[in-house]
Image: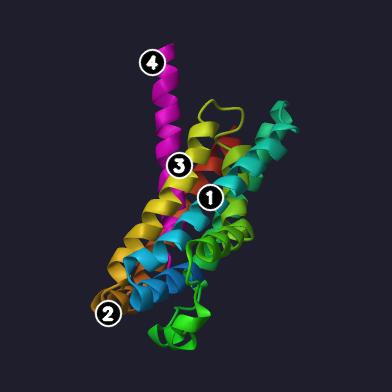
Amino acid sequence: MILEATTLSSALLLKFALGYFAILATPGPNMVTIGTMAALRGFRGALPFCLGIAFGAGLVAGATSLLLEAFAGSQQLEVAGRVVAGTLLMVLAFRIICARAPRVSDQSRFSPRQLPNNWAVGLGTGFFIALTNPVTAAYCFAQFIGPLAQSDAVPWAILLIATQALLFGLLTAALFAHPFMRNVAFTYHRPVSAIAGLTLHSLGLLMILPVVLT
């Protein structure tokens, strides 16, 4: 029984991580800001902003979990949760697929003076940007009310959110420090967005299908 529970939790966390990676991989404002910092200040200059985003995303995930915990319990809620979760993921998928591609020229709006130049400011900026990111909140809500509802894997999922946000931010900073990689990322925005959106759409369908088929 313990082995089966562990296997199930691992599978849920893998799907959870895959979905959040699809969100992170879509070029957007965070990627532009991290890339601009890395381009103008180097990898170390983007590090505090990446840490701030990770802390903020983790806090959003934790707060969402606590909020939903108060309303957990009934089977009807689980069914409704799956429908809401699946619908939210498909809406997010549609938004990602249709999102306008950031332009490399968008970076020209920034100058070194406009970007955080110390750890405290960079950390705080990243933290509050992540804290007000509706996409992370919507994804966590969809997962915690759906497949991860009342699961022992929720604390690990919260840790995964923060860890993935940090690692992806650091990877973005490392890559975008090179002009060639910035051009590649923005040039292939459309296929990346399509793959990410289709991944989230598939996860949404997998949540709703058990409700429809019963």
Q: Secondary structure at mark 3?
A: helix
For the record, the magenta segment spans 1-27
Q: Give the mark nearer the N terminus: 2 vs 3.
A: 3
Mark in the foreground, 1 or 4 = 1
Question: Label 1's element?
Answer: helix
Helix, strand or loop at mark 2 = helix
Tell me the chief SS of the magenta region: helix
Residue 116 among magenta residues: no
**Of marks 1 and 4, which one's residue comes earlier in the chain?**
4
Amino acid bearing label 2: Pro
Residue 61, image x and y in percent?
59, 45
Q: Which residue is mark 1?
A: 55
Q: CA distance from mark 3 to mark 4?
A: 21 Å
* Mark closer to the chain start, 1 or 2: 1
Of the numbered discs in the image, which one, if any, rests on residue 3? 4
Q: Residue 132: give x, y in percent of width and height.
A: 64, 60
Using the numbered discs, state the Cα–Cα distance from disc 1 to disc 4 in whole angstroms: 32 Å
Task: Return the mark for residue 160.
Answer: 3
Residue 168 disc label: none
Query: Dot 2: within a 10 Å radius of its alpha carbon, few (fewer than 14), some, or many (20 or more) residues?
Result: few
